[in-house]
Amino acid sequence: MEVAMPRHSLLRSLFTVILLSLFALNGSYSQKMVKEEITEGKEFWFGIPLCWLDPVTPDGIRGDGPICIWVSSKVDTKGYLEDLETGSRKNFLVRANQITQIIFGDVLMHKPDDNEQVRNKGIHIKTEDPVSVAVYISYSWTGEAFRVIPVEWLGKRYVTANLYLDKVGNQYYRPPQILITATEDNTTIRYRPTAPTINLEAGQLSQPIKLNKGQTFLILGRMEEGRVQDNTSDLTGTYIEANKPISVLSGHTKGAFPRYQFTFLGRNGSFMRNMMIEMIWPIEMLGTQYVSVPVKYNDRPRGKIADDKGDMIRFVAAYDSTVIFQMRKDGTGLKQISTVLKRGQFHEITNQEDPAYYESTKPVLVAQYGKTWWISPVSPKVSDGDEIQNPSRNGQGMMIILAPLPQWTSYATFRSPQNIDNFVAITFRAKDLPYLKFDGKTFTQKFGNSISYINGTDFAYIVEQVAAGDHWIMGDTLPGGKEKARFAGYVYGNWDRSKDGFAYGYPIGVNYSLDCEDSLVVTDNMLCGDVTGQGEALPPTADCAGIFNVQLDKNNSYNYSDVQLNPDFKAGDKKVTFKLFVLNRKEEAKAIVTVQTKSGQTIRREYEYYPELISVDPTFLDFGMMSVGNSKTLKFKVTNIGKVPATIVQLKLKSGKAEFKINTDELPVTLEPQESKEFEVTATPIENSGVPVRDSVIAVLSCYEETIVGLELRTGEPIIYVSDAHWEPQPVGKETPRTVEIKNIGNVDLVITSYDYPDKVHFRVDETTLPMPLTLKPNSIHTFTVYYKADVPGVNHSTRCEFVSNATKIKPYSDWDGSGLDAGPTITSYDWQRKRVIDKFAGTDKYEGEVILDAIGNAKVDIVDLRIDGDPDGVFSFDKKNAPLQLKPNDPVPLKVWFAPKEEKEYEADIVLVGQFSDKQLEVRGKLHGIGILPHINIKDIPSHQLWLEIQLMEMPRSSTLQSTH
């Protein structure tokens, strides 16, 4: 178990785990490891062989498509399928222990014109994790199935299994075939056929044939009338060699055994013949021990034609001096059944009706042929109402390549297609019976009395019909725990009906691991959970020693990336480098990784990562409003809440703001689980700004960085603006008020501590409206009242009121001026402040106000004129109907005025009063003021208290008195 460690302990965290001890023993390498099966691969190359359809009535499609590709895996995975000819690519998903079907057209199926021509018809499958692949070809009267051998297990030397040249009708030849697909560029192949082909005679070695990756080469037997159904046309035993791994499919385009006639009373014999095809094992994977069991049919008669009993078994020699033996039926021992065979020669058991065990002196390829049959010979009837009779019931044959004992497996999934009579044949060691299961049930539960035994051997077998659908076979671990129960499985099916026929068959569940005296060494480094490892197959001098795969157990791993292999790695290389990465370093992670050689030698490694985890309190430090040059220090506490020590290597600012400084004198520091430590941050404003200064503290731990604390300070200055006050000539001796505004238009509090003005004779402040000290929040307004009283007429008085505050700009004073008047008319002003523009939502057509008309002195004043000047928009008006004609001293007359704003803007005009007394005319003016507004308020960045004040100010009327000047 490994954890992420502190920075000062990185040397301890940079450890190397030697997974297995490597030591020399008698010149060989040895390690403690387990040997496991390999049943799947990650890459596949193959072609679609020639399935020759009926020449007269084209076959329909029997299954879901002419070609179905079945992909299964022990784990969830994904991959893609592509072909060289069209460049098309299809992605697919595979669920663990389920079969994914990919329907594929027959455009890339090889044709007779492809015979001995290089074509771009290779099909490529690649997946992230190992899978198994099978191909199912199904037409009305012909088809087959074959298991695709992964690229990792392909070889460079092959011998083939085929059949003689056949014919349907009187003129349609159906030859044996071989299809080769290259898996690498610059591949050179040569072959030596055992029967004539279009370009070669039997036994003649071909010229080198150049293929690149994905290119195919089809070989058909020569089509000559004199060789039809003659062994001289049989390609069985053809030897193929290449300089690089190739895949080889071998069989027949459409044939039958035994030898049936070509026509049936005028109808060609297509329905009695079937495609036969299997992907062939490379010579290095062939074995010397095999078991065969009879192919089962629902109702197959025997003895209707020569050699129609049992099955045909062929043993093809891969090496010279090969001899075949078979266990006697009574189990008394092996007997020799073949002569000494040379490479490419084969021994045939033409009518094998019994299960049997075989041995050979050297590796051989073994093919089992299911036979074509009919229920009765052709018997024409010519009486009225009768029709020409072909066989009233018949069945087709197929071919299966048997698995040698070392390639028996403990696990297989397979699909039995719909609308077919499906069967499964399973061979196994009798002692393993209690440990074998079919679809989750033990063999005994599933098959009962159908279990049979082979005399004189350790082997038993089952041959039973199974339902259409997906199935699985599994062997449990045997006592002792070193290996599992193993078996060889074959699934096949047939459709035996009147003048109709179809058959298929293929091996299921293959153990590809090679027999090799090899060993495996895995070394790895782990830093902050990330793993870098290397696997090496030993000894380096053994050709069979090679790495197969490195795989992550996704079901039992979490928070790790998939295994990444070095890009140039190919299965079979002596070494492989692999990497895994923790996806989220703040969470625990676990990975189980398997490294495996091609012989099945397996090392399983488990990696665990525990992160450094910390909590912080508080997570935000607000330094508030600060003045430039002043400093403030705040603290935060860090606690280790993880399972392992946490090292704080560094504390740094995310944005590097100069206003903040972190005290890092005690770093780096390691906190044990649940241990805490406090840290200080000092803030010092550098300049005033209306924008807050923000930053964050980042904690740099051993394996990752984390933002832990937010920082903020605000700077600014109060800005004072005080309005002025002006009085038009006022009656002598009368005190008249004005309202003055103090505004804080800065972004910090304005504090006014005192005020003063020189002329206290004529001006007076209502101190109740201006208490000291006075604090105004940013963007707020305070109003106070100042009075003016003239003591003589015709003299101007003025003064300035200075305010002492923490503001230095922009107008910390208020200018006041006024003059006195002893006789004549007066008129006041009116300010509506802010009023809604008159529209259908306003609820009125104008807003009412009031001005006061009066006369000072001892004489009456006649009103000569009363009007409004400077109102081009016509928004102001007054009550002309009730306007007075004469004013009496000290008898004020109120006059209604109205404001009707038309748009959102500020309006101002004069209300003019012209009076006459003692043959003199005097003109005085009052101000009419108002602001038209619309009902929208932008409250962005406005404090709630200011918004309330703004709304109140909208509704506050203000008035002033204007008096005449002489």
Image (cartoon, rainbow, N blue to C red):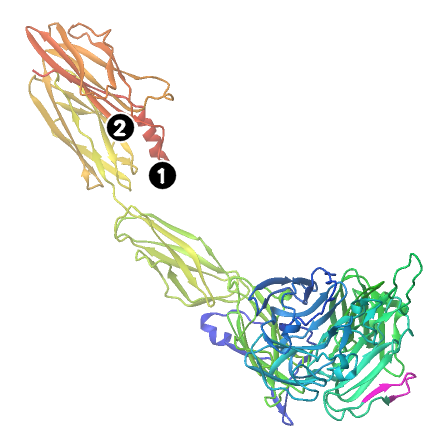
Q: Which residue position holds label 1? A: 940
Instruction: Using the numbered discs, state the Cα–Cα distance from disc 2 to disc 1 in whole angstroms.
Output: 21 Å
Can I make out residue 596 in this image?
no
* Spot occupied by residue 684 in the image (x, y as percentages of width and height): 29, 54
Q: What is the secondary structure assignment of the residue under circle 2? A: loop
Density class for disc 2 (Cα within 10 Å; few <14, some 14-19, many ≥20) is: few
Start and end of the magenta stretch?
Answer: 324-334
Q: What is the secondary structure assignment of the residue under circle 1? A: loop
Above or below: residue 755 compared with residue 487:
above
**For residue 636, side relative to residue 241 (left or right):** left
Quadrant location of the N terminus in the rendered image: bottom right
* Spot occupied by residue 119 in the image (x, y as percentages of width and height): 59, 74
Quadrant location of the C terminus in the rendered image: top left
Density class for disc 1 (Cα within 10 Å; few <14, some 14-19, many ≥20) is: few
Residue 564 image-quadrant placement: bottom right
* Spot occupied by residue 553 in the image (x, y as percentages of width and height): 63, 68
| Front-most of residues 190 and 698 | 190
User: Residue shown at 43%/62% (left/top)?
Assistant: 699
**For residue 517, side relative to residue 398 (left or right):** left
The disc label shown at residue 905, or none: 2
Q: Are marks 2 and 1 in contact (CB under 8 Å)?
A: no
